Amino acid sequence: GAGVSQSPSNKVTEKGKDVELRCDPISGHTALYWYRQSLGQGLEFLIYFQGNSAPDKSGLPSDRFSAERTGGSVSTLTIQRTQQEDSAVYLCASSLAGQGETQYFGPGTRLLVL
Amino acid sequence: AQSVTQPDIHITVSEGASLELRCNYSYGATPYLFWYVQSPGQGLQLLLKYFSGDTLVQGIKGFEAEFKRSQSSFNLRKPSVHWSDAAEYFCAVVLSGTYKYIFGTGTRLKVLA
């Protein structure tokens, strides 16, 4: 079956513009995660969804960042008024319900803010 | 503060040599522990994970890791490295009862022919 897909694979935007990043999880996976990977850094947890609910939004770096998930499937991460420090690879992962279930990662969206 | 430390940013080994990548965590309780690998141009892939029980965990691609509670460590090992193992390796933890995964900053492995 298909793995986790993310779109776009690359995004170049100008400072101050809004961007939307999309994640299609593996079918049947109720848990979905967003991470940010900056150059030379590890993965930074952003948000976790169980179904359409996000019980933990503590990782979102600022109120410019938001995420939603609809139909227990596709998720969108939105960054408003992008800043240069938002440049990073944004990774999505999905898993079956249950703590510690294996996360399957997508290929990521590489965002460059000029 | 809760943290995961991978002390080695880069490691270079010769093909066929043994490998050990270090991971230390700082938590009050024993978390769930994971090792992931990120190969060039590919997404992260789970190598192995530890929840409880036997402290020596076997994973894919011939990797194993040992949990040592006294040292708060979860080091990754492989007896004989292959050139295809060249990649970046991440240690990660999640506390029981939470879903917030904390990743280390990664160790980039280079394999010499």
Image (cartoon, rainbow, N blue to C red):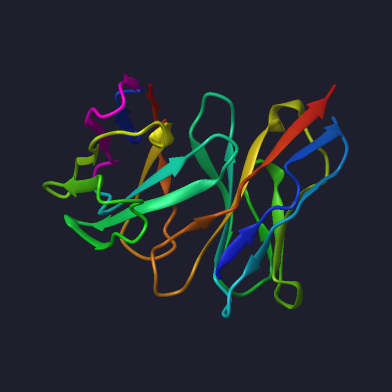
**Image quadrant containing the N terminus of chain B:** bottom right
Closer to us: B11 or B86: B11
Residue in front for this viewpoint, A38 or B83: A38
Report the quarter where the C terminus of chain B lies: top right
Task: Please determine whether, in this image, residue A103 is positioned above or below residue B110.
Answer: below
| Total numbered badges shown on the rendered structure | 0
**Quadrant position of residue A85:** top left
Residue sitting at 42 percent across and 58 percent down? A101
Q: Position of residue B56 (x, y in %)?
A: 71, 64
Q: Position of residue B32 (x, y in %)?
A: 53, 67
Q: Which residues are magenta?
A: A11-27
Residue B106, placed above or below residue B48: above
Q: Residue B23 is drawn in which quadrant?
A: bottom right
Residue A43 image point, x, y percent: 50, 46
* Outermost residue to the left: A71
Q: Is residue B44 visible?
A: yes
Q: Is A98 drawn above or below residue A22 in the view shown? A: below
Q: Is residue A106 visible?
A: no
Residue A16 x/y as whole percent:
26, 29
Position of residue A47 relative to residue B15, above or below, is: below
What residue do we see at 28% from left, 41% from top? A25
Please give the name of the residue rendered at 30% of the width and 23% of the height, measured from the top-left corner: A8
Left or right: B76 in relation to B33:
right
Magenta-span inclusion, residue A79: no
Classify residue B28 as left or right of residue B110. Answer: left
Would residue A20 be counted in the magenta stretch? yes
